[in-house]
Amino acid sequence: MIISNQARAGRRIRLAILGCAVSLMLVPATAFAREKPVWRDAFGSPSADLGVASEQLVINAPELMKLSPEAARTLLVPAPLAGTVRYRVKVSAAGSQIRVRISNEDGKVPLRFTAASLSLAGEGLTAANGSLLPLRFSGAAGLTIAPGVAIVSDPVVRPVSAGADLLVSIALDTPVINYVIGGGQVAVAPGDQTLSESMNGAKQMPGRPLVTGVSVLTSTAPRVIVAFGDSISDGNRRAVGALHSWPEVLASRLEVAKKGRFAVVNAGIGGNQLLSPGWGAAGLARLDRDALRIEGLSHIVLLEGINDIGMSGKSPLGDNPLVTADEIIAGYRQVIARAHMNGVKVIIGTLTPTGGSKSHSSPEKDAVRSAVNAWIRESAEPDGIIDFDAVLRDPAALERLNPAYDSGDHLHPNDAGYRAMGNAIPLKLFH
């Protein structure tokens, strides 16, 4: 059979076209998906109230731990917020547009606000010049948020880089209860000053943010790491511009080493427990809301359980049921099981030293902590571990924090301790 040159050329063209089609079929779908921008959470600060702990002396900030019970109770009394409240938040992913999440998930009455705004942060709680933008919610300037509900703003065009600080301002129509949980700082000013770069008559006070999330529209489709825990993970700090705990250090390192591939969301709540409600819902109860619901979630870094131990039995925190190491370990196994059902890896941090703490220290409690840490190190059940205990402990007294890392209450690290924690995390855990 004789085939002409023209026929051969046609056949080669058809084979080339077929080869291209097959190649396209073999290209992973993610190669095309990443060309389309996606929304990713880039900041988190979970909603929380005092819950059952409102009737107890629950102290979980270094300065409060140094006070008498009477003085601490005075500072912990919830107070109403009115006028304009302004928060400073740091995003861990770059994007071209932004949406803000406002929560009344732990509220008991409707939350009504009349206006809100977003800006790049300048000095402290002052907006960067010319950067203020009004926010809309389903097209409206303000809404009423029912108890148990969170809402997200309409997108606003505001290019932002990873690590940028933003300000979110909300003009309240009715006062809301301000819970002094964790170390968040809020500025409060009279009237509607959402579009004021520097608010007149503003006062700063501690409080849990109403802003529980910020999402960015990003073309890099980063995977999301959630830092899930208590005050030792809580990203809120009393001093504006101060270090926002070890998750912020981790986010900065990942941005340098794996630029655009990961975002870190902080789901720590000061005073939170894994098994029981206290400051905020129990970790096992809020796992879906504060972690598993997040699009693109790939890893949970779990550092929780020290408050379960500290608040166990009789202590300055009250008289509570005893918690055993086996119960905490069972809680960890639940987190692992539920995360694995969603294709998410769980990395667990060892519980840090508490020796000398007024609330969390006793030989019996340290024995429980040691047993939990032994399981974390030896069981091979987590997808990875971070030995925070080894990073922070005093070589001369293993049950205590290293004095160089102790905030002064023998429970919480200082900024140097948080840096040491963040810098000790092996980045190879995230791939």
Image (cartoon, rainbow, N blue to C red):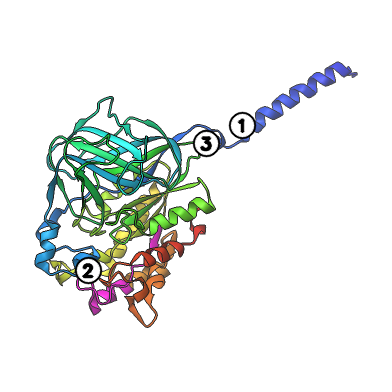
Using the rendered image of the protein, determine whether residue 209 is visible from the camera's viewpoint: yes
Mark 1 sits on what residue? Answer: 25
| Residue 402, visible in the rendered structure | no
Q: Dot 2: what SS?
A: helix
Q: Residue at x 88, y 18 (%)?
A: 5
Comparing marks 1 and 2, which lies closer to the viewer?
2
Q: Amino acid at mark 2?
A: Gly
Where residue 191 sits: x, y (%)?
Answer: 17, 36
Q: Quadrant of residue 67?
A: bottom left
| In the depicted structure, whether residue 346 falls above or below residue 380 | above
Earlier along the polypeptide chain: callout 3 or callout 1? 1
> In this rendering, would 308 be left or right of 253?
left
Tell me the distance, in whole angstroms, between the alpha carbons under discs 3 and 1: 16 Å
Classify residue 281 as left or right of residue 378: left
| Residue at position x 27%, y 43% in the image | 211
Q: Is residue 362 magenta?
A: yes
**Image disc number at residue 310:** 2
Q: Earlier in the sequence, mark 1 or mark 2?
A: 1
Which percent across, then down, holds residue 321?
15, 67
Image location (x, y in percent) of residue 205 = 20, 52
Q: Could you tell me which secondary element the residue under label 3 belongs to?
A: loop
Q: Which mark is residue 34?
A: 3
Measure the C-alpha gap from mark 1 to mark 2: 56 Å
Residue type of the residue flagged with mark 3: Arg
Q: Residues within 10 Å of mark 1 (few under 14, many from 20)?
A: few
Q: Nearer the viewer, residue 258 or 297?
A: 258
Q: Which residues are magenta?
A: 347-370
Q: Which residue: 35% across, 59% down?
A: 245
Q: Nearer the viewer, residue 259 or 84?
A: 84
Dot 1: element: helix
Q: Identify which residue, 337 or 158, lies in the foreground.
A: 158
